[in-house]
Image (cartoon, coloured by chain):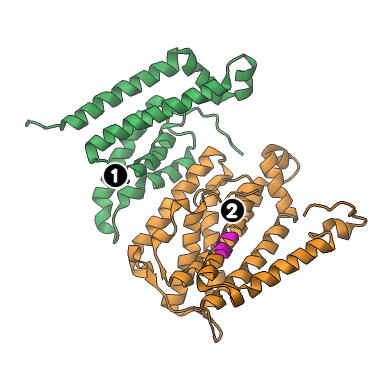
Chain colours: A orange, B green
Amino acid sequence: MALGIGTFQENYAQDMSIFHSRLQWGSLLAFLILLFASPLFLSDRMLTILTMMGISVISVHGLNILTGYCGQISIGHAGFMAVGGYTSAVLCAKLGVPFWAALPCGALAAGIAGLIFGLPSLKIKGFYLIMATIAAHFIIIWTVIQLHSITGGADGLSLPRAKIGSISLSTKTNYFYLVMVLACVATLLAKNIVRTRAGRAFIAIRDNDLAAEVMGVSFGATSCRLFLSVVSMPEWPGPCSFTTTVSQVPTSFPLWIQSGTWGC
Amino acid sequence: VGEISIPSESLIGLIVSVICVAILMLLFRYTKIGLAMRATAEDLQVVQSVGIRATTVYAVSWVIACVLGVIGGILLGGVSGANMDLANIGLKAFAVVLLGGVNSVGGAIVAGIILGMLENVAAGYLDPLLPGGALAQVFPFFVMIIVLIFRPYGLFGLVRIERV
């Protein structure tokens, strides 16, 4: 957050705070209240749009840390999203795992997939890494179609209505709340990840990997951790998106899903 | 020994692509602009300090890339008909480039032949074993991952590579 005129940081706690002034706190609160009150006065159509926006926000946080903060370009993100989405969808539909348990499982599976395809990134970077992630995308989507008996292949997977406890998530309003809570948590998490030791290591590697290595930032360990943590985060929307569409189809994860999502 | 019939589109495609590759190889070996492009790929700062306009070099390389892409597209459209699936060939081309080595014209030819054969052999022998088939679509990408892990500079590329 930018410092307003006349605001000074006088101690360490102030320096570390995300919001520096009452105005910033106030606008955040106003935004959150408006966001969470919006189902009261918005139409179903607008809610669906807002929900998709929330899902995109979660997804972009992962890509933002990976590409923006660590400088590792990933073109295969849609593939990793598919891993997360399909894992939790299969857990829900075939094994009867409750939705709240399937969500982190999907994230974990996508994280592991990211780790597997991230392993070559220990040796390569730049153009070669982009190629590896493109390959990852096509291989993942192809595998999904191959595992016809599990994933339903190209026809997709029809799913039971998701619910947490006794609350059904099939209504647009409940689903909106789930996505928005997850989006807020993801935002807070992303903001804080880049402030931790690991986050500063990411930035050091992006700016100059050789200098980072010399200063004791282990590229291998860091990028492993990065691929695991970062890739698993955007997979939340994977499971999220399947409840809106009710069926999971390979084509809902096109290669173009991440175009225009590279922020700073 | 019997006769083989070659459709005229394929024959034209073969001849034109051979001519293109020959021109490209000569360009990179003998002409000023080709040498400048190779030098720019090697070290941008050095190129700028010896007075080569890097922006012109980049512009020319884009032009060459697009023109060659168009030629390939026209030839491919003649052989297999023009449709949106032609775009997939462009993605598979990455695998060919990586296998051959990123800065090697000759490597691209060899890798193109290797991958084309591998793709069809894999499709022929492995597809019946798989439930969904269509291995030919992704086989180049498996090759790509393997190449990247074990030999990122490809078969004929310069061994110097951006390594961490």
Q: CA distance from mark 2 to mark 1?
A: 32 Å
SS category of the residue bearing label 1? loop
Which residue type does callout 2 highlight?
Answer: Leu
Vertical order, B37 against B96 (above or below)? above
Q: Would you call the spot at circle 1 few (<14 residues within 10 Å), some (14-19), or many (20 or more)?
A: few
**Magenta stretch: includes residue B86:** no
x%, y% of residue B93?
Answer: 38, 38
What residue occupies the far left of the structure in this picture?
B2
Q: Nearer the viewer, residue A200 or B8?
A: B8
Q: Which mark is residue B83?
A: 1
- Position of A184 with respect to B61 (left or right) is right
Residue segment shown in magenta = A53-57
At x 24%, y 56%, the residue is: B128
Numbered disc 2: what chain?
A
The quarter holding residue B5 reads top left
The quarter holding residue B119 reads top left
- Position of B99 with respect to B119 (left or right) is right
Residue matched to label 2: A63
Instruction: Say if residue A108 shows up in the picture.
Output: no
SS category of the residue bearing label 2? helix
Vertical order, A171 against A128 (above or below)? below
- Label 2 or label 1, whichever lies nearer to me, is 1
